[in-house]
Image (spheres, helix red, strand yellow):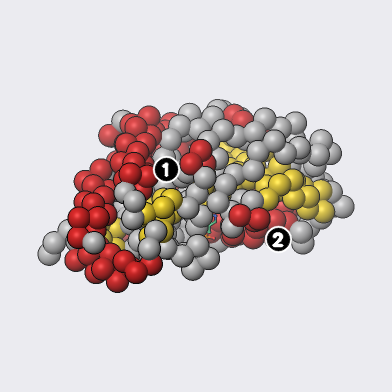
Amino acid sequence: MSKVYNFSAGPCILPQEVLKEASEAVSNFDDLNLSLIEISHRSKNFVAVMDETVSLVKELLNVPDNYDVVFLQGGASLGFIITAYNLMRENGSAAYLNTGAWANKAQKEAAHFGNVVEVASSKDKNYSYIPKGYEVPSDADYFHCTSNNTIYGTQIKEFPTVDVPLVCDMSSDIFSKPVDVSQFDLIYAGAQKNMGPAGSTLYIIKKDIYGRNGRSIPSYLNLKIHADKDSMFNTPPVFPVYVSMLTLRWLKANGGVEWIQERNEAKAALLYGEIDRNPLFNGVAAKEDRSNMNATFVLANEAHKETFDQMWNDANISGIKGHRSVGGYRASMYNAMDLEGVQALVNVMKELENRV
Ligand SMILES: *Cc1c(COP(=O)(O)O)cnc(C)c1O
Protein backbone atom coordinates (compact mmCIF):
# COMPACT_ATOMS: atom_id res chain seq x y z
CA MET A 1 0.00 0.00 0.00
CA SER A 2 1.26 3.49 -0.76
CA LYS A 3 2.00 5.99 1.98
CA VAL A 4 -0.81 8.36 3.00
CA TYR A 5 0.16 11.80 4.28
CA ASN A 6 -2.10 12.33 7.27
CA PHE A 7 -2.82 16.00 8.02
CA SER A 8 -5.83 15.28 10.27
CA ALA A 9 -6.48 17.81 13.05
CA GLY A 10 -7.26 15.23 15.71
CA PRO A 11 -7.20 12.37 16.37
CA CYS A 12 -4.20 12.51 14.15
CA ILE A 13 -0.90 11.16 12.96
CA LEU A 14 1.36 9.20 15.34
CA PRO A 15 4.83 7.81 14.60
CA GLN A 16 4.66 4.60 12.51
CA GLU A 17 6.98 2.74 14.88
CA VAL A 18 4.73 3.64 17.81
CA LEU A 19 1.67 2.23 16.02
CA LYS A 20 3.54 -0.96 15.25
CA GLU A 21 4.74 -1.50 18.80
CA ALA A 22 1.31 -0.62 20.19
CA SER A 23 -0.40 -3.16 17.97
CA GLU A 24 2.03 -5.85 19.10
CA ALA A 25 1.27 -5.04 22.75
CA VAL A 26 -2.43 -5.52 22.07
CA SER A 27 -1.81 -9.21 21.45
CA ASN A 28 1.29 -9.91 23.52
CA PHE A 29 2.52 -7.40 26.07
CA ASP A 30 5.92 -7.71 27.77
CA ASP A 31 6.10 -11.36 26.60
CA LEU A 32 3.33 -12.22 29.03
CA ASN A 33 1.28 -13.82 26.26
CA LEU A 34 -1.46 -11.50 27.46
CA SER A 35 -2.76 -8.30 25.92
CA LEU A 36 -1.88 -4.96 27.47
CA ILE A 37 -5.63 -4.30 27.61
CA GLU A 38 -6.52 -7.49 29.48
CA ILE A 39 -4.14 -7.27 32.42
CA SER A 40 -4.81 -5.57 35.74
CA HIS A 41 -3.94 -1.89 35.88
CA ARG A 42 -2.42 -2.73 39.28
CA SER A 43 -0.14 -5.42 37.88
CA LYS A 44 3.55 -4.60 38.10
CA ASN A 45 3.77 -4.54 34.31
CA PHE A 46 1.16 -1.82 33.95
CA VAL A 47 2.30 0.16 37.00
CA ALA A 48 5.71 0.29 35.28
CA VAL A 49 4.02 1.77 32.18
CA MET A 50 2.30 4.50 34.21
CA ASP A 51 5.51 5.28 36.10
CA GLU A 52 7.58 5.54 32.96
CA THR A 53 4.97 7.71 31.21
CA VAL A 54 4.89 10.14 34.13
CA SER A 55 8.70 10.27 34.34
CA LEU A 56 9.00 10.88 30.60
CA VAL A 57 6.59 13.83 30.88
CA LYS A 58 8.67 15.22 33.75
CA GLU A 59 11.95 14.71 31.96
CA LEU A 60 10.92 15.98 28.52
CA LEU A 61 9.23 19.12 29.85
CA ASN A 62 11.64 19.70 32.71
CA VAL A 63 8.77 19.67 35.21
CA PRO A 64 9.89 21.12 38.58
CA ASP A 65 9.57 18.99 41.75
CA ASN A 66 6.67 21.02 43.13
CA TYR A 67 4.39 19.74 40.36
CA ASP A 68 2.36 16.54 40.00
CA VAL A 69 1.71 14.79 36.70
CA VAL A 70 -1.49 12.78 36.33
CA PHE A 71 -3.42 11.08 33.55
CA LEU A 72 -7.22 11.10 33.62
CA GLN A 73 -10.05 10.35 31.23
CA GLY A 74 -12.65 12.80 29.92
CA GLY A 75 -10.53 14.72 27.43
CA ALA A 76 -9.74 18.40 27.56
CA SER A 77 -13.49 19.00 27.78
CA LEU A 78 -13.50 17.56 31.31
CA GLY A 79 -10.39 19.66 31.93
CA PHE A 80 -12.53 22.77 31.38
CA ILE A 81 -14.70 21.69 34.32
CA ILE A 82 -11.87 20.36 36.51
CA THR A 83 -10.02 23.66 36.15
CA ALA A 84 -12.89 25.72 37.49
CA TYR A 85 -13.86 23.19 40.18
CA ASN A 86 -10.31 23.03 41.57
CA LEU A 87 -9.35 26.68 41.25
CA MET A 88 -12.39 28.94 41.47
CA ARG A 89 -13.68 29.94 44.91
CA GLU A 90 -17.43 29.92 45.69
CA ASN A 91 -18.60 33.28 44.32
CA GLY A 92 -15.13 33.74 42.92
CA SER A 93 -14.15 34.88 39.48
CA ALA A 94 -11.83 33.73 36.73
CA ALA A 95 -10.36 35.52 33.71
CA TYR A 96 -10.47 33.93 30.25
CA LEU A 97 -8.82 34.78 26.95
CA ASN A 98 -11.25 33.94 24.16
CA THR A 99 -9.17 32.83 21.18
CA GLY A 100 -11.48 30.28 19.59
CA ALA A 101 -14.08 27.55 19.89
CA TRP A 102 -12.21 25.56 22.57
CA ALA A 103 -11.33 28.64 24.60
CA ASN A 104 -14.97 29.65 24.41
CA LYS A 105 -16.16 26.24 25.59
CA ALA A 106 -13.72 26.38 28.50
CA GLN A 107 -15.15 29.67 29.62
CA LYS A 108 -18.75 28.48 29.25
CA GLU A 109 -18.04 25.56 31.58
CA ALA A 110 -16.34 27.82 34.13
CA ALA A 111 -19.44 30.02 34.20
CA HIS A 112 -21.21 27.15 36.02
CA PHE A 113 -18.88 27.75 38.96
CA GLY A 114 -18.64 31.53 39.29
CA ASN A 115 -18.09 34.78 37.51
CA VAL A 116 -16.19 34.60 34.23
CA VAL A 117 -14.43 37.70 32.96
CA GLU A 118 -13.53 37.62 29.28
CA VAL A 119 -10.38 39.76 29.21
CA ALA A 120 -10.18 39.85 25.42
CA SER A 121 -11.61 38.08 22.38
CA SER A 122 -10.69 37.74 18.73
CA LYS A 123 -14.21 36.72 17.76
CA ASP A 124 -14.61 39.99 15.82
CA LYS A 125 -12.31 38.58 13.11
CA ASN A 126 -13.37 34.96 13.34
CA TYR A 127 -10.51 34.21 15.76
CA SER A 128 -7.83 34.83 13.16
CA TYR A 129 -5.46 36.50 15.64
CA ILE A 130 -4.35 36.40 19.30
CA PRO A 131 -5.44 39.49 21.26
CA LYS A 132 -2.62 41.32 23.05
CA GLY A 133 -2.33 44.14 25.57
CA TYR A 134 -5.32 43.08 27.69
CA GLU A 135 -5.49 43.40 31.46
CA VAL A 136 -6.17 40.54 33.83
CA PRO A 137 -8.10 41.58 36.97
CA SER A 138 -5.84 41.08 39.98
CA ASP A 139 -8.66 39.55 42.04
CA ALA A 140 -9.28 36.71 39.55
CA ASP A 141 -8.75 33.22 40.97
CA TYR A 142 -6.85 32.36 37.79
CA PHE A 143 -6.27 33.33 34.17
CA HIS A 144 -7.04 30.73 31.49
CA CYS A 145 -5.64 30.65 27.98
CA THR A 146 -5.42 28.19 25.08
CA SER A 147 -1.89 27.85 23.73
CA ASN A 148 -2.85 26.68 20.24
CA ASN A 149 -6.17 27.24 18.52
CA THR A 150 -6.54 24.06 16.54
CA ILE A 151 -9.52 25.18 14.44
CA TYR A 152 -8.34 28.67 13.45
CA GLY A 153 -4.59 28.05 13.20
CA THR A 154 -3.32 30.57 15.73
CA GLN A 155 -0.82 29.99 18.51
CA ILE A 156 0.33 32.02 21.50
CA LYS A 157 4.03 32.70 20.91
CA GLU A 158 4.69 34.31 24.27
CA PHE A 159 2.60 33.68 27.36
CA PRO A 160 1.51 36.78 29.27
CA THR A 161 3.00 37.52 32.67
CA VAL A 162 0.06 37.74 35.04
CA ASP A 163 -0.28 38.28 38.80
CA VAL A 164 -2.80 35.48 39.20
CA PRO A 165 -2.39 31.70 38.73
CA LEU A 166 -1.92 30.81 35.07
CA VAL A 167 -3.86 27.89 33.53
CA CYS A 168 -3.42 26.65 29.98
CA ASP A 169 -5.17 24.20 27.68
CA MET A 170 -2.20 22.88 25.68
CA SER A 171 -4.07 20.08 23.94
CA SER A 172 -2.82 20.78 20.45
CA ASP A 173 0.77 21.88 20.97
CA ILE A 174 2.04 20.09 24.07
CA PHE A 175 5.45 18.47 23.45
CA SER A 176 5.82 20.41 20.18
CA LYS A 177 8.43 22.74 21.72
CA PRO A 178 10.00 23.50 25.10
CA VAL A 179 7.70 25.17 27.64
CA ASP A 180 8.57 26.78 30.97
CA VAL A 181 6.25 24.77 33.22
CA SER A 182 7.15 26.91 36.25
CA GLN A 183 5.09 29.77 34.75
CA PHE A 184 1.89 27.74 35.10
CA ASP A 185 -0.28 26.60 37.99
CA LEU A 186 -2.11 24.11 35.81
CA ILE A 187 -1.57 22.71 32.32
CA TYR A 188 -3.89 20.18 30.75
CA ALA A 189 -3.94 18.49 27.36
CA GLY A 190 -5.99 15.78 25.67
CA ALA A 191 -3.65 13.08 24.35
CA GLN A 192 -5.02 12.80 20.83
CA LYS A 193 -2.91 15.45 19.12
CA ASN A 194 0.75 15.00 20.00
CA MET A 195 0.72 12.07 22.45
CA GLY A 196 -1.50 9.14 21.69
CA PRO A 197 -5.04 7.91 21.09
CA ALA A 198 -8.03 9.80 22.44
CA GLY A 199 -9.02 8.71 25.93
CA SER A 200 -6.38 10.10 28.23
CA THR A 201 -5.72 13.64 29.36
CA LEU A 202 -2.51 14.91 30.89
CA TYR A 203 -2.57 17.31 33.85
CA ILE A 204 0.54 19.06 35.16
CA ILE A 205 -0.41 20.57 38.49
CA LYS A 206 1.44 22.93 40.79
CA LYS A 207 0.99 21.26 44.17
CA ASP A 208 0.08 24.41 46.05
CA ILE A 209 -3.26 24.72 44.24
CA TYR A 210 -4.67 21.80 46.23
CA GLY A 211 -7.44 22.85 48.57
CA ARG A 212 -6.88 26.49 47.76
CA ASN A 213 -10.44 27.39 46.78
CA GLY A 214 -12.08 25.76 49.81
CA ARG A 215 -14.68 23.87 47.78
CA SER A 216 -15.86 20.38 48.46
CA ILE A 217 -14.95 18.60 45.20
CA PRO A 218 -16.37 15.22 44.09
CA SER A 219 -13.59 12.60 44.05
CA TYR A 220 -13.18 12.08 40.33
CA LEU A 221 -12.98 15.83 39.73
CA ASN A 222 -10.50 16.42 42.54
CA LEU A 223 -6.96 16.66 41.18
CA LYS A 224 -5.37 16.02 44.56
CA ILE A 225 -7.08 12.63 44.85
CA HIS A 226 -5.69 11.56 41.48
CA ALA A 227 -2.21 12.82 42.31
CA ASP A 228 -2.22 11.06 45.72
CA LYS A 229 -3.24 7.81 44.00
CA ASP A 230 -0.64 8.13 41.21
CA SER A 231 -3.39 8.24 38.54
CA MET A 232 -4.81 4.95 39.87
CA PHE A 233 -7.84 6.30 41.78
CA ASN A 234 -9.93 4.31 39.34
CA THR A 235 -9.01 2.26 36.26
CA PRO A 236 -6.82 4.53 34.16
CA PRO A 237 -7.12 4.58 30.36
CA VAL A 238 -4.49 1.87 29.99
CA PHE A 239 -4.13 1.78 26.21
CA PRO A 240 -3.95 5.57 25.63
CA VAL A 241 -1.43 5.88 28.46
CA TYR A 242 0.68 3.06 27.01
CA VAL A 243 0.70 4.59 23.52
CA SER A 244 1.54 8.00 25.01
CA MET A 245 4.51 6.35 26.72
CA LEU A 246 5.69 4.97 23.37
CA THR A 247 5.33 8.38 21.70
CA LEU A 248 7.25 10.08 24.49
CA ARG A 249 9.99 7.41 24.24
CA TRP A 250 10.16 8.16 20.50
CA LEU A 251 10.43 11.87 21.22
CA LYS A 252 13.17 11.37 23.79
CA ALA A 253 15.17 8.99 21.58
CA ASN A 254 15.15 11.54 18.75
CA GLY A 255 16.32 14.47 20.84
CA GLY A 256 13.31 15.69 22.84
CA VAL A 257 11.39 18.92 22.59
CA GLU A 258 14.33 20.97 21.27
CA TRP A 259 14.67 18.55 18.36
CA ILE A 260 10.95 18.53 17.63
CA GLN A 261 10.74 22.32 17.84
CA GLU A 262 13.34 22.63 15.11
CA ARG A 263 11.54 20.10 12.94
CA ASN A 264 8.15 21.73 13.54
CA GLU A 265 9.53 25.16 12.67
CA ALA A 266 11.05 23.83 9.46
CA LYS A 267 7.74 22.25 8.41
CA ALA A 268 5.77 25.41 9.20
CA ALA A 269 8.29 27.60 7.35
CA LEU A 270 8.00 25.36 4.28
CA LEU A 271 4.19 25.42 4.16
CA TYR A 272 3.66 29.09 5.11
CA GLY A 273 6.41 30.01 2.66
CA GLU A 274 4.40 28.41 -0.14
CA ILE A 275 1.10 29.93 1.04
CA ASP A 276 2.72 33.38 0.90
CA ARG A 277 4.56 32.81 -2.38
CA ASN A 278 1.83 31.12 -4.37
CA PRO A 279 -0.71 33.65 -5.72
CA LEU A 280 -3.41 30.97 -5.74
CA PHE A 281 -3.49 30.73 -1.93
CA ASN A 282 -4.10 33.03 1.04
CA GLY A 283 -3.30 32.35 4.68
CA VAL A 284 -6.16 32.80 7.17
CA ALA A 285 -4.40 33.61 10.46
CA ALA A 286 -2.51 36.83 11.23
CA LYS A 287 1.13 36.22 10.30
CA GLU A 288 2.64 36.87 13.73
CA ASP A 289 0.16 34.47 15.37
CA ARG A 290 0.41 31.60 12.91
CA SER A 291 0.33 28.15 14.45
CA ASN A 292 3.20 25.75 13.82
CA MET A 293 0.74 22.89 14.32
CA ASN A 294 -2.32 23.82 12.23
CA ALA A 295 -1.98 25.96 9.10
CA THR A 296 -5.26 27.42 7.78
CA PHE A 297 -5.45 28.68 4.21
CA VAL A 298 -7.95 29.31 1.42
CA LEU A 299 -7.90 29.40 -2.37
CA ALA A 300 -7.74 32.91 -3.80
CA ASN A 301 -10.19 31.76 -6.45
CA GLU A 302 -12.87 29.22 -5.50
CA ALA A 303 -13.05 28.13 -9.15
CA HIS A 304 -9.89 26.07 -8.56
CA LYS A 305 -11.43 24.04 -5.75
CA GLU A 306 -12.41 20.97 -7.74
CA THR A 307 -9.01 20.72 -9.45
CA PHE A 308 -7.05 21.26 -6.24
CA ASP A 309 -9.15 18.76 -4.27
CA GLN A 310 -8.65 16.14 -6.96
CA MET A 311 -4.90 16.80 -7.05
CA TRP A 312 -4.24 16.43 -3.35
CA ASN A 313 -6.44 13.38 -3.17
CA ASP A 314 -4.41 11.82 -5.99
CA ALA A 315 -1.20 12.66 -4.12
CA ASN A 316 -2.35 10.53 -1.13
CA ILE A 317 -2.88 13.59 1.05
CA SER A 318 -5.56 13.14 3.69
CA GLY A 319 -7.35 15.35 6.19
CA ILE A 320 -6.74 18.89 4.92
CA LYS A 321 -10.35 19.98 4.59
CA GLY A 322 -10.84 23.06 6.79
CA HIS A 323 -13.10 23.11 9.84
CA ARG A 324 -16.65 24.13 8.93
CA SER A 325 -16.34 27.39 10.89
CA VAL A 326 -13.32 28.54 8.84
CA GLY A 327 -13.72 26.78 5.48
CA GLY A 328 -10.88 26.33 3.03
CA TYR A 329 -8.05 24.08 4.16
CA ARG A 330 -6.25 23.19 7.36
CA ALA A 331 -3.04 21.22 7.29
CA SER A 332 -2.16 19.90 10.74
CA MET A 333 1.54 19.25 11.10
CA TYR A 334 1.77 17.55 14.47
CA ASN A 335 5.01 16.06 15.79
CA ALA A 336 4.82 12.79 13.85
CA MET A 337 4.43 14.52 10.46
CA ASP A 338 7.80 14.74 8.75
CA LEU A 339 9.15 17.35 6.36
CA GLU A 340 8.60 14.97 3.43
CA GLY A 341 4.84 14.98 4.10
CA VAL A 342 4.68 18.78 4.09
CA GLN A 343 6.80 18.82 0.94
CA ALA A 344 4.25 16.53 -0.74
CA LEU A 345 1.51 19.08 -0.03
CA VAL A 346 3.67 22.00 -1.15
CA ASN A 347 4.42 20.15 -4.41
CA VAL A 348 0.70 19.84 -5.12
CA MET A 349 0.21 23.57 -4.46
CA LYS A 350 3.03 24.39 -6.91
CA GLU A 351 1.63 21.99 -9.47
CA LEU A 352 -1.76 23.70 -9.27
CA GLU A 353 -0.07 26.98 -10.12
CA ASN A 354 1.57 25.40 -13.17
CA ARG A 355 -1.67 23.85 -14.30
CA VAL A 356 -4.17 26.73 -14.10
C1 LIG B 1 -9.00 18.96 20.54
C2 LIG B 1 -9.00 20.06 21.53
C3 LIG B 1 -9.87 20.07 22.64
C4 LIG B 1 -10.94 19.01 22.86
O1 LIG B 1 -10.44 17.93 23.46
P1 LIG B 1 -11.35 16.69 23.89
O2 LIG B 1 -10.31 15.76 24.37
O3 LIG B 1 -12.09 16.23 22.67
O4 LIG B 1 -12.27 17.15 24.96
C5 LIG B 1 -9.76 21.10 23.55
N1 LIG B 1 -8.86 22.08 23.38
C6 LIG B 1 -8.04 22.12 22.31
C7 LIG B 1 -7.08 23.24 22.17
C8 LIG B 1 -8.09 21.11 21.36
O5 LIG B 1 -7.28 21.15 20.29
**Mark 1: which secondary structure?**
loop
Q: Residue furthest right?
A: 91
Sequence-wise, which precedes: disc 1 or disc 2? 2
Q: Is mark 2 within 8 Å of ligand 1?
A: no
* Residue 79 x/y as whole percent: 61, 54
Instruction: Give the Cα distance between marks 1 and 2.
Output: 27 Å
Q: To which residue does mark 2 refer?
A: 108
Q: Residue at x 76, y 59 (%)?
A: 111
Q: Is residue 172 left or right of residue 129?
A: left
Q: What's under tag 1, amino acid-wise?
A: Asn
The disc at residue 58 is none
Q: What's under tag 2, amino acid-wise?
A: Lys
* Residue 80 x/y as whole percent: 64, 55
Q: Is residue 138 left or right of residue 247?
A: right
Instruction: Inspect this view and state whether residue 57 appears.
Output: yes
* Residue 15 x/y as whole percent: 28, 49
Instruction: Inspect this view and state whether residue 71 appears.
Output: no
The foreground one among 216 and 315 is 315
Q: Residue at x 53, y 36 (%)?
A: 157
Looking at the image, residue 279 lies above or below residue 38:
above
The foreground one among 49 and 288 is 288
The foreground one among 49 and 148 is 148
Q: To which residue does mark 1 refer?
A: 292
